[in-house]
Amino acid sequence: MWTDAQKDLDIQLRREREEFLQPEKDRVKVFKMLAASYIKYMQIFRSLETAHDQLVHWQKRTVIRQVLDGVIGRILEMKKEMVELENSEFHYIDNILEDLKLLPEDIEVPIPRYFVKEKLEVLQQREKTLDQILLNAGLQTEKHVKTMTFEEAIKTIQVAERARQGRHRAAFMKQIYLEEKRERQTKLQVQLGPNLDDAATCIQKVWRGYIQCKKTEKMREEEMIFLGMSLPPHLKAMSISQMHAGQINALEGEVRERHEEVFIKDKLRETEGLNIKETLQDQIGQCFIECRHIIGKFPDYPTEEAGGSMAILSQKTPEQVAAELAAKKEMALQKKAQKGKKEEGKEKMKGKKPQKTGKKEEEEGWKMAPSNFLSIMEEGNSQYKAVWQNRDEGWDFLQDHDPELIKEEKREEVEEEIRVQVDELMQQKLENLKLAVDGEKSNKQKKGRKKNEGGEKRRKKKKIPEMEEDLTPDRTIDSLYRELVEERLLIKAKTVNLSDYVGEYSYLGTTLRQVDIEPMPSLADVRQLIALYGILPLGSQTVHEKAPLVKALLLAGPAGVGKKMLVHAICTETGANLFNLSPSNITGKYPGKNGLQMMLHMVFKVAKQLQPSVVWIGDTEKIFSKAVPKAEEEMNAKRLEKILPKFLKALKAQDRVLLVGTTNRPFDANLKPFCKVYQKIILIPRPDYASRFVLWKHIILQNGGVITNLLNVSCLAKVSDGFTQGHIVQAVQAALSELRLLQMTRKPLRTAEFMTSLARQDPVYKEEEETFKVWYAKTPLGKARIGALAGNKKAGKGTWKPQLVYLQTTPWVQGVTKR
């Protein structure tokens, strides 16, 4: 799998060098190129992630991890280009998938398992600490025992005891009745006499039925194995043992890695240490003599910062070093002259208007932006070709590590350690030579003092602003963590995977766009955006630092579409801390402007220290609301409006902190500051027919129900048009009570049982849905999308307005036309 993925990656890298370097004017062709590359990288990503998770060989895993981070980053760069090209977060490439003979599942973003596996111990310890703090503070959710009086307790015991005696007496009477029945049957048989033919017929009937059932089961199993839908029996028996063996090998490999590295390093130091030391001394001494003959004096020994003896032992002659110094001086003089010319040019250009370059860019066409990840992928690809592609591994049965590669790495470390000792000896030798031959004395101590004094002054100057910025310099991260937990600003995330957010892919997106109809995004599209913008950057430090930076994410949609669930899914998949800064949660905490600043400072300080972290703001529209209702004046949510952007601006690329806002009324907020904070806006719609069909089946099975022919899931999906996932979950939970689950075997589920609880809830009406569409059209990306569509649609009478529709036949959708 790893070999196949590397071959595909090599082909894709060659293709990028050929296609993406040349400008292209046709935007449709550009999007097809990007979409095809995006799909190919997604397939490579899936294969590499599986190989990285299943391999035990830690050196191979290191190489795969480097390439994997590069592929993830390149996917995010491709996504950014596609968004800028189409002015839309949602893309419909079902026609390209059809051409490539692929399924929608093939472009589903896989969540790398090493996000959580590599820090599993840290996450478990953090969860224990969090539970302990909540328990000590009395905030742990526990079932409260109902208190009762002495008389009530006696009455409860009496009722229970009488019921126990009644059950015992009923069982005793049933036993007497069965014994009497058996006695009567025995008497009748004795009177009539045994019938051997009837007994033999009965035995034959049961036996033949049993044999035929076994034969039928065996035939079905053989048919499923032949069709490739189930594993053969010997593979099924081995699967459990293989899983245990894989886990044990992984643990042994980790332990062996630590012991093997230390053992090989010590062995190298013993066997090759003396030879390395002598070789270094001879080489450095020879350099001293050559410099003395050419320059006329001994050179100064380079400092540790300059590289020590590494600078001396570079593969350059003294003449080359002198030429380089002369060239550097010339370059410095040229730079000064160029700066002077630029300043003169600026003075001349004052008052002149700059020429517009927009037309030139349009004439040149689209060109791919420079990538931060192509070099990473090429480096990993070349390392694979040089080391692993043709490597003979027939001797390595365990496949856990390669000692020869460890020797190569550890030999460099041993050489560096010995080099430090050699530098001290040779530096003293050089001073002695200078004193004996040239009569020079070293002034090292004086220079060192001056440098130290200047360094101390500089450090003091740098520390002053840092102390002013840090509002809690005397407090530890543990104390801040404890305070945030006690104030319920740091909460425990629910264990929810992104795969639990069930939804179907949109199969007619391209077809609708071809007839000038803008389709509504599907739940599968939403799930993909959450993985791309939330999970992948937070999970990998390399990806977060070099990929297009997303600091804030807004999830907007009607109540019950799963916004909070997606927030918890981001935390579960990445092992992130969850901070709750919702207006309802910060009410009465840290009052005043200074208190608010202190709260945000503590949250972001702990979030950066214990990254990855997610800062969640529920009902975020209240922070940017146009007018605060009288009932909510006490909450004073608008106090975050001015100070929140400053803290977001302070977040850097290396800080894996994501701000996630959720809202079901985004149209109540001032649009300009709202969109300034949240750079990525994801509109989550109510589920369409295909998603509702999958949802009903999934939720019924999840709650213990059994789907039979008497339950028409298609009818449920049709009737529940307009209802969200939350409504469906509530309807199923109300219908499938404990008593109803006990009756499941003799009374199968019927469609009408879910109608009553569903009818009690209010659906998402057309007016509310239209409000969301109008609001999204006013966002920067929505305006750009409408402008691009209007620019492409010049023919025809009247003005053209894009329609957002669902992929289902409802009466009001059927009337939607192009104009």
Image: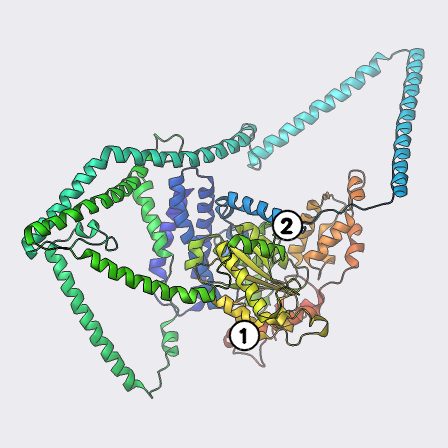
Q: Which residue is tagged 2?
A: 134
Residue under the point 41% across and 42% down: 61
Local packing at callout 1 (Cα closer than 10 Å; few below 14, some 14-19, many 20+) is some
Q: Position of residue 553 (x, y in %)?
A: 55, 63
Question: In this view, which residue lies farthest toward the bottom?
Answer: 351
| Relative height, residue 321 to residue 286 (above, below) | below
Q: Nearer the viewer, residue 703 or 710?
A: 703
Question: How many discs mark residues in the rendered view?
Answer: 2
Depth-wise, is mark 1 or mark 2 nearer the camera?
A: 2
The answer to whether any part of residue 507 appears in the image is: no
Q: Tell me: 429 left or right of 506.
A: left
Q: Any mark on residue 783, and which?
A: 1
Report the residue at 34% width, 29% height from top: 395
Observer-nearest of 454 and 17: 454
Q: Amino acid at mark 1?
A: Lys
Relative height, residue 299 to residue 183 (above, below): below
| The quarter of the displayed image where residue 507 is located | bottom right
Judge from the rendering whether residue 418 lies leftward or rightward of residue 553; answer left or right: left
- Sooner in the amino-acid sequence: mark 1 or mark 2: 2
Image side of residue 103 versus residue 377, left or right: right
Find the distance from the CA under tag 1 to the CA under tag 2.
Answer: 47 Å
